[in-house]
């Protein structure tokens, strides 16, 4: 068991799920009430990792670019937004029910499980044809029967009620099926209130909700999640070069997270969603589940702004300030599920190896993503002089390192190292009796176990260089 990646470990996803619960990354939603399917809570270390992924994405799209701005739009929107976007009619998954126990299954995914190529964007007739030909190979996950209804479309929008508690439901409001619609609604406001000019992009991280038929695969398919979206507004027919550049930039960002290139691949959509003229997905090779989508890059042409012009009656065309040409911008979109990226980052970092002859689990996270940057230990917790010096070093580093610096005196030094390895802490600092006499400490590297003696007054500069 020398340096095994999770892809080489049997039941790898089960081990990741166990680690997430044990070490405070992910908890089952409403667990004390038995849990709520498709809902998860990010624990103390999970939220740190999630926030760092968000910060990396925001830096990439807003801080490192001259023509992108940020947005945070409201969750609730006028119901006509979802009519204009096509979601009230075209946002659906293929559903079938077990005739014996009424358990619902998502047909395209069940077909994929038995090796039949299927896609939720296929026509209802085509899916029924495939399903009918393969029903004998599919059994109900609840009762085991093989008797199902015909396939029908199941709309994924989650209905809600806002303000009017006597409403008959004739015009419900919806939780957002995707986060990006707020960008289209504010496109004109951004033009009027900032100095951006086409081409320009808008970046947003926002919540989305989907009434999933069968939530599955841990964080991969949930009913509540966050999306990180960009919409690049460009001149008509100037999409091809910008689209290819966008695809390369998104691929390179995943590599910057420490994800290995061999665990990523592209997939072009054959059956396009109603708004796209071209669509590519970045897939990640999840342990146990295999390759599946983490991000979509879509060429949406002028569909979105044209639809919102039609339904709102507001002119959303753009006038070039130099040529005075008037046109509806085309849109190139990137859209990723943060839960999926979180799971991909964890999966790629999860390693089992031998260190000093002892087996260990270690998350080899990139330094800028690690939930805890540095952990500080007194060698012995029952020696007040060591504890006091460790607390001094801890306070000093907390003020000089951007990120969590953790103090840990629980258990022996070996157990503390193992705990920090499992949460991905890159460096551990140990204060021993030599520290009291010589003013230096032991700094231990997570990945190789190497230990160096560093002067206390040089620690801040040492870590600044390491994390730069």
Image (cartoon, rainbow, N blue to C red):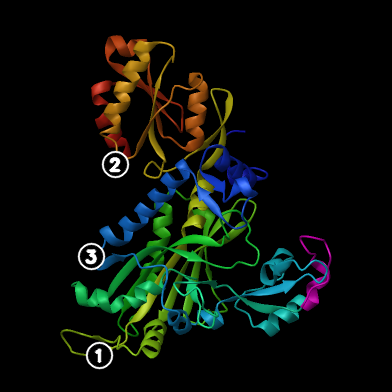
Q: Report the side of 454 relative to 167 (left or right).
A: left
Name the spot of residue 439 as percent of width and height, x first.
27, 15
Q: Which residue is mark 2?
A: 468
Contact flag, marks 3 and 2 (Cβ < 8 Å)? no
Q: Secondary structure at mark 3?
A: loop
Rounded to the nearest angstrom, the CA distance separating label 1 from label 2 is 46 Å
**Residue farthest toward the front in the current orientation of the protein:** 166
Residue occupying the point 30% across, 82% down:
235
Percent across and percent down for residue 234 are 31, 79
Question: Residue 273, percent across and down?
Answer: 53, 79
- Nearest to the observer: residue 222 or residue 114: 222
Label 1 vs label 2, nearer the camera: 1
- Which circle marks residue 326 in the picture? 1
Q: In which quadrant is the C terminus drawn?
A: top left
Task: Answer above or below: position of 208 versus 364.
Answer: below
What segment is highlighted magenta in the picture? 132-149
Mark 3 and mark 2: span between their CA atoms?
23 Å
Q: Main secondary structure of the magenta part?
A: loop
């Amino acid at each position: 068991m020398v340096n095994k990646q999770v892809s080489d470990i049997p039941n790898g996803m089960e081990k990741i799920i166990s680690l997430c619960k044990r070490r405070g990354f992910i908890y089952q939603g409403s667990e004390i009430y038995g849990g709520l399917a498709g809902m998860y809570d990010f624990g103390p270390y999970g939220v740190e990792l999630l926030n760092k992924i968000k910060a990396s994405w925001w830096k990439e799209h807003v801080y490192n670019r001259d023509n992108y701005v940020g947005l945070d739009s409201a969750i609730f929107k006028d119901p006509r937004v979802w009519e204009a976007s096509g979601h009230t009619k075209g946002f659906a998954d293929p559903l079938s029910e077990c005739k014996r126990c009424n358990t619902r299954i998502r047909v395209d995914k069940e077909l994929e499980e038995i090796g039949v190529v299927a896609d939720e964007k296929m026509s209802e007739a085509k899916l029924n044809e495939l399903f009918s030909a393969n029903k004998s190979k599919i059994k109900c996950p609840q009762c085991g029967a093989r008797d199902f209804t015909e396939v029908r479309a199941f709309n994924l929008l989650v209905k809600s009620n806002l303000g009017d508690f006597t409403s008959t439901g004739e015009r419900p409001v919806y939780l957002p099926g995707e986060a990006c619609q707020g960008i289209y609604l504010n496109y004109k406001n951004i033009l009027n209130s900032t100095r951006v000019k086409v081409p320009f992009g808008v970046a947003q991280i926002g919540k989305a909700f989907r009434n999933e038929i069968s939530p599955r695969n841990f964080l991969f398919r949930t009913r509540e999640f966050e999306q990180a979206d960009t919409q690049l507004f460009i001149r008509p027919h100037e999409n091809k070069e910008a689209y290819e550049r966008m695809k390369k930039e998104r691929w390179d960002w995943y590599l910057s997270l420490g994800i290995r290139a061999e665990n990523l691949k592209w997939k072009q959509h054959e059956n396009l969603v109603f708004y796209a003229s071209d669509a590519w997905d970045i897939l990640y090779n999840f342990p146990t589940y295999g390759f599946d989508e983490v991000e979509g890059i879509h060429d949406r042409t002028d569909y979105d702004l044209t639809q919102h012009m039609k339904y709102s009656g507001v002119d959303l065309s753009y006038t070039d300030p130099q040529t005075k040409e008037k046109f509806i911008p085309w849109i190139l979109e990137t859209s990723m599920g943060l839960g999926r990226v979180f799971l991909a980052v964890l999966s790629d970092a999860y390693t089992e190896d031998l260190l000093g002859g002892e087996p260990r689990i270690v998350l080899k996270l990139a330094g800028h993503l690690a939930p805890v940057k540095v952990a500080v230990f007194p060698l012995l917790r029952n020696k007040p002089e060591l504890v006091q010096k460790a607390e001094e070093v801890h306070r000093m580093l907390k003020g000089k390192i951007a990120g969590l610096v953790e103090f840990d005196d629980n258990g022996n030094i070996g157990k503390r190292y193992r705990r920090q390895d499992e949460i991905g802490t890159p460096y551990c600092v140990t204060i021993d009796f030599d520290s009291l006499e010589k003013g230096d400490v032991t700094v231990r590297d997570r990945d190789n176990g190497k230990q160096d003696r560093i002067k206390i007054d040089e620690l801040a500069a040492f870590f600044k260089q390491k994390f730069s």
